[in-house]
Every structure is written in structure tokens, then in C-alpha cells.
Image (spheres, helix red, strand yellow):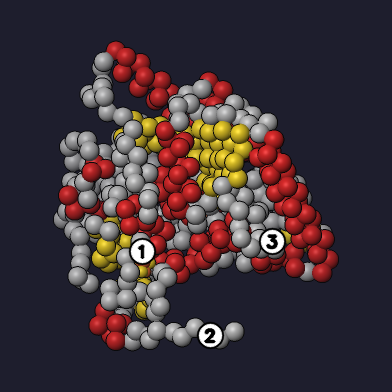
Amino acid sequence: MQDLKLKANENRGLHQLEAGFDLLGWDEVTQGSVLPSFEGDATGIAGLKAEERDYSHHNSYTATVASWRVKKPVFNIDVCIDCQNCWVWCPDSSILSRDKQMLGIDYDHCKGCEVCVEVCPTNPKSLLMFSEQEDLETALSQWPEKKKKEKK
Amino acid sequence: MAITSIKNLKEFSTNNDRFEGAHTLCPGCAHSMIVRELMNCTDDNLVISANTGCLEVSTAVYPFTSWDTSWIHIGFENAATAVTGSEVMHKVRKKKGTLKDNDAPVKFVAFGGDGSTFDIGFQWLSGAMERGHDFTYICLDNENYANTGGQRSSATPIGATTSTAQAGTHSYGKKEKKKDIVSIMAAHGSPYVAQLSPNKWKMMAKGFQKALETEGPCFINTVSPCCTEWKFDPKDTIAITDLATDSLIFPMYEIIDGHELNILYRPKNILKVEDYLGAQGRYKHLFKPEYKHIIEKIQSDIDADWARLQRREEARV
Ligand SMILES: Cc1ncc(C[n+]2csc(CCOP(=O)(O)OP(=O)(O)O)c2C)c(N)n1
Ligand code: SF4
Ligand code: SF4
Ligand code: SF4
Ligand SMILES: [Mg+2]
């Protein structure tokens, strides 16, 4: 479950956003250009999950901003209560929730802002920031214990 | 129309995002939180336009787009114009029966920053409201021209430092009060106008759905903390909105048909505005002894505005 990766198409994560692809010069961009977000018909897109969609290579979903991150959030599914706070406030559509369950983080789009960690209500938190190089197992082995409430 | 369930977050989270990642907004930017929430409030087709600003330039980095709906890239002041033009075209084509699917429900939405909404696109927004189109305009109010380096706008509050109203030896930052855009929009006779904040996700979703469902021109001002120009740690975006709504510097309320004012959120513990100001670098200078009176002024303005809102709620005029 933890390594879940919802690959929507083969292009996913292929492009460095900064580099783009087939980049045109400023004077080569056609006026009134149209960028299709999907291959073919886009009817009923709201009813399709990301992995069911046929994204075009113009859709930023196929790009990555992973290189922006200095630290990454790590998800500990054993503590999570599926409240979906992280889902509603993630500014980068990077919380992978399916059927009311939080399943993991989309590391191609996460910028490491730490908002999800801040809004996670569990004790200990179900999301914590680790160095980008840390592997999942090591991160999970360092998970803190439940914090006792401080007496006032 | 098909609005989605906002009964609780679990149900809300079953929506499939139509606003995609790998846009280039700063980490922790509230603009995308607000846009994602709007788009998850309905299953209907959406036609969206955006005024130039952080949202527009960061979600359409050629040759990419982060929008899974029809989306129009237009000039700084023209989002309201472009989307209401589309709305008219849709109406006419529907009447003629020349649409691909004549019965598919469509909603028209325009996004603008405070610079484009309060200042530079104000005339175009006013025109679209007056013409009475069926659309929803959402202002992402980060109280400055963020995309061009943080200049002052008429949404910038007193005492905030910006690149064109800088705090220094002889200045405490901006001297003028923030423009009351919500009242101005209500005065257009709009059927639904509101001020909302992303920390209260359900209240915000409810307001968005009301606006989408209401026929006619609706306007919503949303507080959108900008970590870069307000100078706070990106992880604190939601904490800042908590301070904003609970100190009442950003009260949440709606105005129906220009006169029925309902306060949507009454904080149990009203915080001192100092807590909100102290959490942001743009107000740091106000904590010098010589500017103590500015903080006092901000607080007394908030108290007066809150009393006025309550009187308007009661009077319903
Ligand atoms: C007519 C015109 N004037 C100025 C600009 C330059 N400009 C582009 S974005 C921007 C600032 C946008 O500020 P705001 O509307 O508050 O949106 P934000 O970036 O803060 O979200 C400005 C001044 C422009 N594109 N067009
Ligand atoms: S760190 Fe920020 S971008 Fe990454 S998943 Fe958390 S909230 Fe989303
Ligand atoms: S905020 Fe924390 S507890 Fe809630 S769904 Fe996300 S990870 Fe799980
Ligand atoms: S400058 Fe502010 S509004 Fe613009 S993308 Fe960054 S955080 Fe968002
Ligand atoms: Mg702005």
C-alpha cells in the first residue's frame, strides 16, 4: 500500500517542467493556441479517476516538480485515521485518496510545503518530514511515540 | 446541477481533481487550495477564465496546462469579460441547438487576484455584474500584486509593507484602509456575495455551491495567504487563515440580494489582531514602540467593522 503509485500514463513524471519539451521561442508561439488536456474526448472527466484518464502530454499532470523539494513528507498508514485534512489542503493535488482512504503521496507533484503535516490531527502525526534521501523503511523505524498531553 | 456531497471530508475526498499538480505556484500557496475546492464542488462542466496573476501564469506554463476543464488565458483585467462572453455564446448556441451536447450542464467561473479585482479589472467586473450574466467571480485576495513582486493594491490593509508602500524610517507601510469590495459587489444587486476562507473548508464549499447554483452574477472574496509576500513559513498557510478568521480581520459572511447579510462564522474566542499581525513578516515593523498606535488603530477598525456587520445582519437593509 505504501509504495502505491498511480501511473496514469507512460509520460507521467517524464518532463522537467522547467525544461519543457519541443520548446518554442517566444516569437514562434502561435496566437490563440489551444492546449488539449486530454487525448480525444474529455466528456465526463469529473467521473474518472486520474489512473483512468488519457492525459495528453500538454497536461501538467504528466510533468514533475519533484526537484523543487528539499524535504519530503513520509506517510505512516498505521497511524492514519483517513480524516482527509491533508487531501483538502494540499496545494499541489498530491494526496492520493481513493474511496475515502488516504493511500499515499504523489512524489512527482509534491513540493514539500509541509502543509499536510501541519494539518494532520493524529498523535503521533501520520505524516512527517524527512530528508529527500531517506528511504521509507528507515523513516518509519524512526517514527515518534504517542505524545502525552502536557499538564497545565 | 450536480453539486457534490460536502457532508464530511471523507465524502468530499471522493471527488476526482480537475486541477492538476506540477503547476508552478509557490509551495504552500493558498490560491490552488481555493481553486481545487471550487472545482471539487461540482461535477458539471466548467468554463473558467483567469485574470493575469500568479494563478494564471503558474497554471499555463506553455506548453503545459494544469486545467482539466475549458480554461481561457486572457489579459489582466478580462476574466469577467471573457467568461461572460462565453456564457452568452453558450446560451445562444443552446437555443439554436448547435452544441455537441445540448443538455450538459455548464457553469461559468472567473478567477482574479485582488490587484485585478479591486483595481485594474474593476470596471470590467462591474460591467459584467451589471449586465447580469449567470456566472461566479472568485477573488483570490492575497492583498498585493504578488506576481509582479508584491506591490500595494487597494486590498492591502493599513500597516502592511509592500514594495511600493514600504515601511522604513518615515513610514509604517500602507496608510490607506482596505477597500470594502464585498459591499461594493452587493451594491450591484448581486443575488449572492460572500467572503470566505479556506481554513473553514465546509463553509467555503457551501458558499461556492450556493454561488454556482444561484442564477445571476455572484461574487466571492476569499482570503488567500501568500507565504512569499506576507513572509511566513509555507507550512503555516492554514494556521494563518485560522488567525485571520478568529481575529475577525477576515470575517466570513454572505449578502443575499444586496441586503440580507448573514454572518457565517462567530469565533468562540476572538483573538487579538496582534496574534495575526505577529505571525507575518509584512507587519514586523508595527511592533516597534513608535507604531503601537497603528496596531491599536487596526484593532479598533476591526471592532467597528464587526459591530457594523452585526447591525447590518439585524437590520437586513
Ligand atoms: C494591464 C496590465 N497591467 C499590468 C500587468 C502586469 N501584471 C501581471 S500580474 C500582475 C499582478 C497581479 O496581482 P493580483 O491580481 O493581485 O494577483 P496575484 O498575482 O497577487 O495573485 C501585474 C501587475 C499586466 N499583465 N497587464
Ligand atoms: S508537502 Fe505540501 S505538496 Fe507535498 S503532499 Fe504535503 S501538502 Fe501536498
Ligand atoms: S491528515 Fe493525517 S490522519 Fe488525516 S488523512 Fe491525512 S495522513 Fe491521515
Ligand atoms: S507569490 Fe504568493 S500568491 Fe504568488 S504563487 Fe507565491 S505564494 Fe502564491
Ligand atoms: Mg494579489
The image shows residue B262 at horizontal and vertical percentages of 59, 41
Q: Amino acid at mark 3?
A: Val
Instruction: Provide the secondary structure element on which disc 3 rests.
Output: helix
Q: Nearer the viewer, residue B282 or B108?
A: B108
Q: Is residue A66 visible?
A: no
Name which residue lies at 34% across and 46% down: B5
Q: Chain of mark 3?
A: B
| Distance from mark 1 CB to nearest ligand 3 atom below 8 Å | yes
Residue denoted by label 1:
A83
Q: CA distance from mark 1 to mark 3?
A: 30 Å
Near mark 2 (Cα within 10 A), the count class, few <14, some 14-19 or many ≥20, is few
Residue denoted by label 2:
A150
Near mark 1 (Cα within 10 A), the count class, few <14, some 14-19 or many ≥20, is some
Q: Amino acid at mark 1?
A: Cys
Q: Quadrant of residue B229?
A: bottom right
Residue denoted by label 3:
B273
Q: Which quadrant of the figure shows ligand 3? A: bottom left
